Image: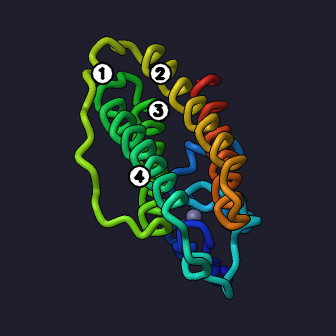
Amino acid sequence: MEKIKCLICGMNININNYDFNNTTMVEKNIENNIINCPFCGVNRLYFDNNLDLHKTENLDSNIISIFDKAMKLEIFNGQFYKEASKMAKAEDIKKLFKELSNIEYMHAKIHKKLGGLKIEPNLFKPDYSKHDTDELLLKEASKREEHAIAFYNKYMREVSSEFVKDVFKALIDVEKQHKHISQNK
Ligand SMILES: [Zn+2]
């Protein structure tokens, strides 16, 4: 396998990791057809070995505050999925939530890096115990993905930076896949 780098999360994709987090993807990666980044889930349109998106731009304070909000949203969802993976009863749902948690935490890392954010916030942890069946957990997952899609859509329109628009567009596609999968389990 040739060397592949994801521009959005900066990870290198190779023979040992191409199938990570496959349960979160509508079309699964196989060895000779890598469709999505196994770490952040973005489409292969964003694979490039020669560019480094993370160093391209000076950001104004408005964009930094948007990255801060985005980071918090992704950590919040990452925490939910981590809890959900412990609470779920069916093995395949547990695995799905664990892998969704990996992807959302990676999104948080992307925002942290792009926004040059220093602090990992200690977020309020809600009580998830009312979601006491796999069906309810999946319903909550779908709601959160819907919210994330709306968030990125809103800010994609507000920001002037083409680069930030691109990142949010890439992530919207990922969250849409998550929504689709959580509604069709
Ligand atoms: Zn990636």
In the foreground, 160 or 40:
160
Q: Secondary structure at mark 4?
A: helix
**Foreground of the two, 158 or 50:** 158
Please name the residue that numbered disc 4 is placed on.
105
Image quarter in which the N terminus is found: bottom right
Q: Looking at the image, do the residues carrying marks 2 and 4 touch, with CB atoms under 8 Å apart?
A: no
Q: Nearer the viewer, mark 4 or mark 3?
A: 4
Does residue 29 show up? no
Q: CA distance from mark 3 to mark 1?
A: 20 Å
Residue type (three-letter) at the residue carrying disc 4: Tyr
Sequence order check: which comes first, mark 4 or mark 3? 3
Colour convention: rainbow
Are the residues tagged 4 and 3 within 8 Å (C-beta)? no
Q: Residue at x 47, y 21 (%)?
A: 140
Residue 43 is left or right of residue 92, and the answer is: right
Q: Marks 1 and 2, Cα distance to the nearest angstrom?
A: 10 Å
Front residue of this view, candidates 63 and 79: 63
Q: Which mark is residue 92?
A: 3
Question: Do labels 3 and 1 touch, CB within 8 Å?
Answer: no
Q: Is residue 126 above or below residue 111?
A: above
Rendered view: 39 above or below 47: above
The answer to the question of whether label 2 and label 3 lie on touching residues, with beta carbons closer than 8 A, is no
Q: Residue at x 60, y 78 (%)?
A: 57
Callout 2, which amino acid?
Glu
Q: Residue at x 54, y 67 (%)?
A: 60
